[in-house]
Image (cartoon, grey):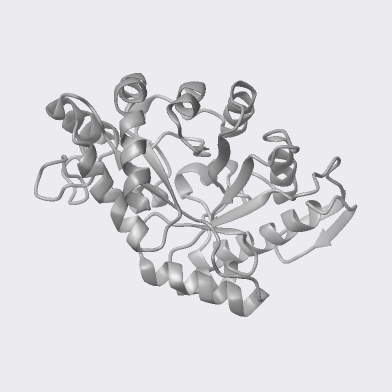
Amino acid sequence: MPFSAERAGFDFEVSSDHYFPWLASQGHAPYAWSVLGAVAQVTEQVELFSYVTCPTMRYHPAVVAQKARHAADPRDGRFTLGVGSGENLNEHVVGGRWPTVSRRQQMLKEAIQIIRELFTGELIDWKGEYFEVDSARIWDVPETPVAIATTVSGERSVDMFAPLSDHLIAVEPNKDLVDAWHGARRRATGLPGEVRVIGQIPICWDPDRDAAVRRAHNQFPLVRWRLGRQRRPADHGRLRGCDAVRPCGGRRRLHPCGPDLDAIVDAVRKYWEAGFTDIALVQIGDEGQELFLKEAAGSLLEKLRTESH
């Protein structure tokens, strides 16, 4: 599948880093770092992202630095480490109390600082507020360090992470957020603000629109932040009744569904207009992946590239 996506013309591929699936019906969530390593072996040029890893609870930041260094061939610079402050759904499994947003962001800040230090290839000792590192070193560091992209959601996280990160990840086409990121980065580092801004949009392409609607409703039915707070995969039957759940084509359409490629382009356009440079298209459902790559991906990418210029 990853090789098929590369042949179809995609520029980059992302892997979520979850312990649990979002829904119990999805069955499992693969270990992201095994997936990334395998994809690196069967592709040649496509960029790879962790999208995103929480380097503070389930993983120690020193371990994440080693993972990122070896996720792909360091000579080709294809891997970007995407990081975020985590979701209770995935991080509670190690037994710690779920921290407040402010504390999670402070933990993430310190974790990024540690990872940056280790990316230098020097022997590192660190004793901070949240983490300790004892004589750690990442060997064979490439000339160009692994890039770090950080998820943000508001002014506080922008000011905290723009000086520490190479790129921005956000899940909504918020132009104010993008502009604030560029401004904060310029003020803090003196570097140009025009860095990569990576977003994502769920789509459910299928030649049968009704089938696409059903699949999207079954596999991607709810607003993400609700899952970030819970401790176990959602029971879909229980969630059907909540306000966040809407079938595509219902009163609140959450995802472009069906064979209409122009509808997908229109949805992505909001991100371009907000200043995003990269978009991760999340094709919903396992059963639709091969058909999407075979019948629609090439034409969709052509449309997107034409419209973005």
Rendered location of residue 95, percent (x, y): 58, 45
Rendered location of residue 59, percent (x, y): 65, 44
The reply, left or right, for residue 242 in relation to residue 50 is left
Q: Is residue 121 visible?
A: yes
**212 is higher (above) or lower (below) than 178:** above
Q: Is residue 154 visible?
A: no
Q: Nearer the viewer, residue 45 or 209?
A: 45
Q: Nearer the viewer, residue 53 or 189?
A: 189
Rendered location of residue 36, percent (x, y): 59, 31
The reply, left or right, for residue 37 in relation to residue 120 is left
Quadrant of the rendered image containing residue 85: bottom right
Rendered location of residue 258, percent (x, y): 18, 32
Q: Which residue is found at the position 48% from the left and 24% from the top?
A: 7
Q: Which residue is found at the position 10% from the left and 44% from the top?
A: 250
Q: Residue furthest left?
A: 251
Q: Residue furthest bottom?
A: 187
**275 is higher (above) or lower (below) than 142:** below
